[in-house]
Amino acid sequence: MKNAAVAVEDTDENRQICMKYCGICPSYRKNNMGKYQPDSLFCSRGMSCFEEKKEDRCFCLACELFTKHHMALGHFCTQQ
């Protein structure tokens, strides 16, 4: 779930950091989220537009951006 106070910038550097975690995340892989927009950096860009999302384990909590920006919850790809 997105925290209103979170301000993760949509930059190439942040997308590269994000994909270290999203790229191996079970929810991301199970739903082929790389094929839909936004395809990464969900904490900044919002949840995936893929309509039939099925949540699995979430790797957001391990992400460097999650810690740096003091986020509270994960599953940014499937929840707002």
Image (cartoon, rainbow, N blue to C red):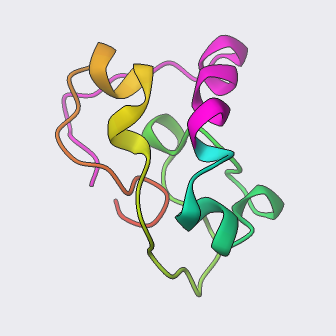
Q: In this view, does 3 lie to the left or right of 26?
A: left
Identify the residue at image location x=27%, y=28%.
Answer: 6
Q: Quadrant of residue 49?
A: bottom right
Q: Is residue 79 left or right of residue 70?
A: right
> Viewer-proximal residue, 55 or 48?
55
Q: In which quarter of the image is residue 45?
A: top right
**Measured along the vertical axis of the image, is residue 40 above or below residue 29?**
above
State the image coordinates of residue 73 (x, y, percent, origin top left): 22, 47
Image quarter in which the C terminus is found: bottom left
Identify the residue at image location x=44%, y=47%.
Answer: 59
Please tell me whether residue 14 belongs to the stretch shown in magenta. yes
Q: Quadrant of residue 8?
A: top left
State the image coordinates of residue 11 (x, y, percent, origin top left): 64, 16
Identify the residue at image location x=64%, y=48%.
Answer: 24
Q: In this view, does 49 lie to the left or right of 79?
A: right
Look at the image and give the residue range highlighted in magenta: 1-21
State the image coordinates of residue 16 (x, y, percent, origin top left): 69, 22
Identify the residue at image location x=36%, y=64%.
Answer: 79
| Residue at the farthest right position | 35
- Count the marks: 0
| Residue at the farthest bottom position | 52
Please tell me whether residue 54 belongs to the stretch shown in magenta. no
